[in-house]
Amino acid sequence: MSRIRAADALARRLYHAGCRRAFGMPGGEVLTIVDALEAAGIEFVLCHHENAAGFMAEGAHHVDGAPAILVATVGPGAMNGVNVVANAEQDRVPMIVLTGCVDPDEAETYNHQVLDHRTVFAPITKATFTLTEGAAAVQADKAVRIATGAAGGRCGPVHVDVPISVADAPVPDEMILRPDAAPGSIGGAALATAREMLARAERPIMLAGLDAVRDGAGDAIRAFCEAYSVPLVTSYKGKGLLDEAHPLALGGAGLSPKADTHLLPLFREADLILLAGYDPIEMRTGWRGVWDPATQDVIDIAHDANLHGMHGATLEVIAPVGETLDAIRVGLEPRPVWDCSETRAALKAAFAAEDWGPGAIVETCRAVCPPGTIATADSGAHRILLSQMWDCDLPRTLLQSSGLCTMGCALPLAIGAKRAAPERAVVGFMGDAGFLMVAGELASAAALGAPVVFVVFVDRSLALIELKQRQRQMRNAGVDFGATDHAAVARAFGGAGVTVRDRAGLRDAMEAALAAETFTLIACEIDRKAYDGRI
């Protein structure tokens, strides 16, 4: 039997899992890992900060479905990635985190950059391993299965610490693959109960989320909703499970009190609530305890048991979302029930765009961008507005950090998505503060030749925090900052940059950007308090 390096065994298993790209910042301790990834057919994409690299990896994952791969060197490199790993845990992203580490024997007499990576990552990952020579292939397989939820539960990050000598150690050239567990299904008694609930319901409503996206349950959700005229609300990450131009789609929910005034009454009035892969980690506290399982039928279909306490359920099912909805629906007489068209119209009116401001920016960009456009959103006031106004025709077309809500994610998410789908339009939306956190990654966009469009809401303030500060009648402190010529920054990195102050200018800039061969940054200048009353 031929011999390969342990790092090759790891890389080949990742390739088998569908991985074609890894993102990171190399150091001497991960050179063998990078070499092994490339040899296995996995492109290593050089980034300029490990946190951004992780978000690029996530962006690619949302396009190709394969686990994201983040590569970070020992010590400071690994620590730079902590935020994005925590984000992957809270946003249910299957991510393989590969870090180099000093050999244990060496660490006994040498302490430069030596720290316990596994202790740091343990609370924010589903599992953490130290690669060993004899079990490299098995550990790689375990990491993939745990990260992707094939071993049970939701997706999430898995950390693999790779000692320098182990990466280079010769191991047998063999592939060890563990069979995936068969997906669960709804039991006979639970199915009968669910069908009884649906048969008697007069006011059903569905709330779908990230587990449904993972399951590819969009077709099943549409068939179910259309059969019984069931209105659909999604979490922000569930947007597009049903084309949001559909009359039954009520859009995303989670962080907008303005939207909640229209949506929460429907859930309080409903006699059947169908939770289709709904993960409440995306939702604000206003969604806690909205319905009462003692007086309302609540069917909760999810990948994991309810340990969050955000809501209760009459019937809890741990099974694939689409298959379960089909099983409940098929065989029952389709019938229309209640009409929520007035709520849909009221929501559209509530978020109608102004002549110029953040709403006008979203509306103008949505009108110019083609179907299937992938949009990304940073954290902040613009994300809440964008998530209410940006209609998605497909799942995974509005990418954001909605569990951890971390800033600085939109730009790298967009770069990663464009790398994986060069033929699709990709637009990253961000506030000026979030952009300044990751402006250096424009160099990555330039190096990759990625014609991404970056739209920056320029109000020279941490708008959402400034608004909360005023609502609490506190003095203005630490939320405003000086002017930056964002367009000039983009040009300095080799892209196109333009500043706009009205709809016509934005429309022209967006049309040109979508046809450009390099990245374009569009700085949209708006008033400092432009979000007042909007979200």
Image (cartoon, rainbow, N blue to C red):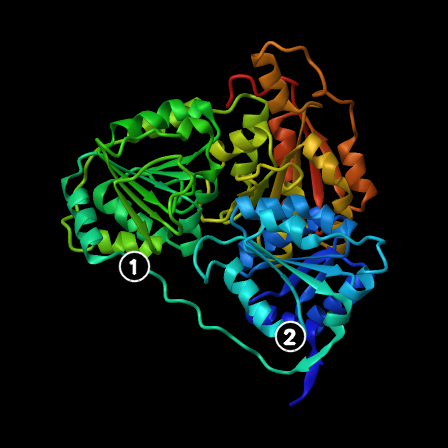
Query: Where is 286 relative to 421, above or below?
Result: above
Query: Horizontal and vertical percent for residue 182?
Result: 37, 66
Q: Quadrant of residue 114?
A: bottom right
* In this view, 489 is above or below 16: above
- Dot placed on the residue nearer the N-terminal end, 2 or 1: 2
Disc 2 secondary structure class: helix
Residues packed near mark 1 inside 10 Å, few (<14), some (14 to 19) or many (20 plus): some
* Towards the viewer: 521 or 367: 521
**Residue 429 on image: x %, y %:** 62, 37
Furthest residue to the bottom? 1
- Which of the pair 68/420 is nearer the observer? 68
What distance separates the C-alpha of mark 2 from that of mark 1?
34 Å
Q: Which picture quadrant has residue 287?
A: top left
Amino acid at the residue labelled 2: Ala
Residue 185: image tag: 1
Of 344 and 193, which appears nearest the observer?
A: 193
Q: Is residue 158 visible?
A: yes
Residue beneath the point at 47% across and 32% down: 388
Q: Residues within 10 Å of mark 2 (few under 14, many from 20)?
A: many
Write the residue at 60% across / 30% down: 380
Residue at image x 40%, y 55%? 216
Q: Are marks 2 and 1 in contact (CB under 8 Å)?
A: no
Q: Is residue 108 above or below residue 365?
A: below
Q: Circle 2 is placed at which residue position? A: 9
Label 1 is placed on what type of residue?
Answer: Ser
The N terminus is located in which quarter? bottom right
Measured from the top left, where is residue 383 in percent x and y?
Answer: 56, 33
Q: Secondary structure at mark 1?
A: loop
Looking at the rendering, which quadrant does residue 97 occupy?
bottom right
Q: Which mark is residue 39?
A: none
Residue at 70% from the left image edge and 21% from the top image edge: 479
